[in-house]
Amino acid sequence: MEKVKKNDKARKRPRIAVLLGERENSFWMEWKRHLEGLAGEQGMETLFFWPPASDEVRGQLYGLHEMIELDPAAIIVNPMTKDNLVPGILTACRRQIPVLDVGAKTDQDLLFPHPSCYFPVKTVDFVLQGRLGGEYILRRLQQRGTKTKKVVILEGRPGARQSQERSAGAAQVFRQDPSFEVAARVAADFQKQKAWKTTEGILQEISEIGGFFCANDQMALGAAEAVEKNGRKEEILIVGVDLIPEAREAIRLGRMDASVAFSTASVARAVLEALDEILSGRPFFEGYRVESEVVDAVTLDAWVEKEG
């Protein structure tokens, strides 16, 4: 991370520190590009921190403490679990540095009493994303008239709110139809390689599977590779979340069926809108700011054109 001077709040051009997620996930690179560009247009300077791949969860906390020492105008965080950044958030609040939690992923009960400098920015509705993915699988399998109504949910990192809520949303949908069964619900830590290995094991254990709902696209890509390798793509639907560039290509090629998409540019704009509300003293909007939708091979080109 670059060396900068302290007392940033006195600078005419405010510097905003941003804590990112896994570097291997192209979602974060795309979001970083949008945030950096939009912040620059608004006269802000952004400083980004990537956690080390060797220990991303604890590395995020180390990065947050390092950012606090720079005394920026505000800190934007993307927590990997519901509790990994709690000590750092409390330290930032003692320094009176506003902390914006993208996706409101931190367990606020752990911050009790709620510090006035912590702002949970609700970007997308994670439960709704899971429901949308589950409904897509349910509808497609019903249209096929398939007898195979066993489905699998690949969850992300234990303790990650987006994983828990996306998985819960999908499970809610599957439970609504008594003819469907969630045959397995397994954590693959948001990682493509782990999802591939996990799916390989599931395919050996369960003979009839209708679909996989994966809590992010990295896991969906790993599951898709395993399904294709085992010659079962024609019978198994694969749905992810995020619509990262690799997932768009996989959908075009028929390796994935769909992804629950939302605009990374809109998320970046929403975070900067929240930041402006905080720094200007305007009322802080507590609702969801960005919409999600399912994108498949039929709607992909229109979505890409819309998003530019």
Image (spheres, helix red, strand yellow):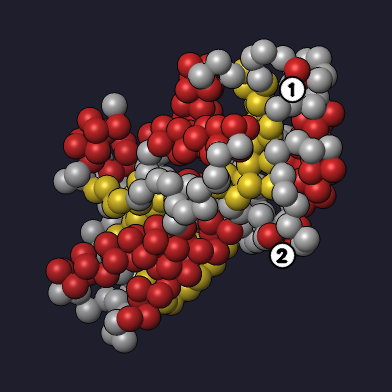
Mark 2 neighbour class, 10 Å CA radius: few under 14, some 14 to 19, many 20 or more: few
**Kind of residue sitting beneath label 1:** Lys
Number of the label disc, if any, that sits on residue 109: 2
Q: Nearer the viewer, mark 1 or mark 2?
A: 1
Q: Is residue 212 visible?
A: no
Q: Is residue 199 above or below residue 45?
A: below
Q: Say whether disc 1 or disc 2 marks the residue closer to the N-terminus.
A: 1
Mark 1 neighbour class, 10 Å CA radius: few under 14, some 14 to 19, many 20 or more: some
Q: Nearer the viewer, residue 205 or 63?
A: 63
Residue 127 quadrant:
bottom left
**Kind of residue sitting beneath label 2:** Asp
Give coordinates of residue 158: x percent, y percent.
Answer: 64, 61
Mark 2, secondary structure of its residue: helix
Residue 20 quadrant:
top right
Q: Look at 40% across and 46% down and name the residue there.
A: 290
Q: Is residue 263 above or below residue 48?
A: below
Q: Are marks 1 and 2 in contact (CB under 8 Å)?
A: no
Number of the label disc, if any, that sits on residue 9: 1
Q: Is residue 306 above or below residue 226?
A: above
Give coordinates of residue 5: x percent, y percent.
Answer: 81, 15
Q: Look at 46% across and 26% down and name the residue there.
A: 34
Q: Quadrant of the C terminus?
A: top left
Q: Look at 33% across and 81% down and name the residue there.
A: 176
Residue 60 quadrant:
top right
Q: Is residue 169 above or below residue 123?
A: below
Give coordinates of residue 188: x percent, y percent.
Answer: 56, 57
Specify whether 16 is left or right of 254. right
Q: Look at 61% across and 37% down and name the residue there.
A: 281
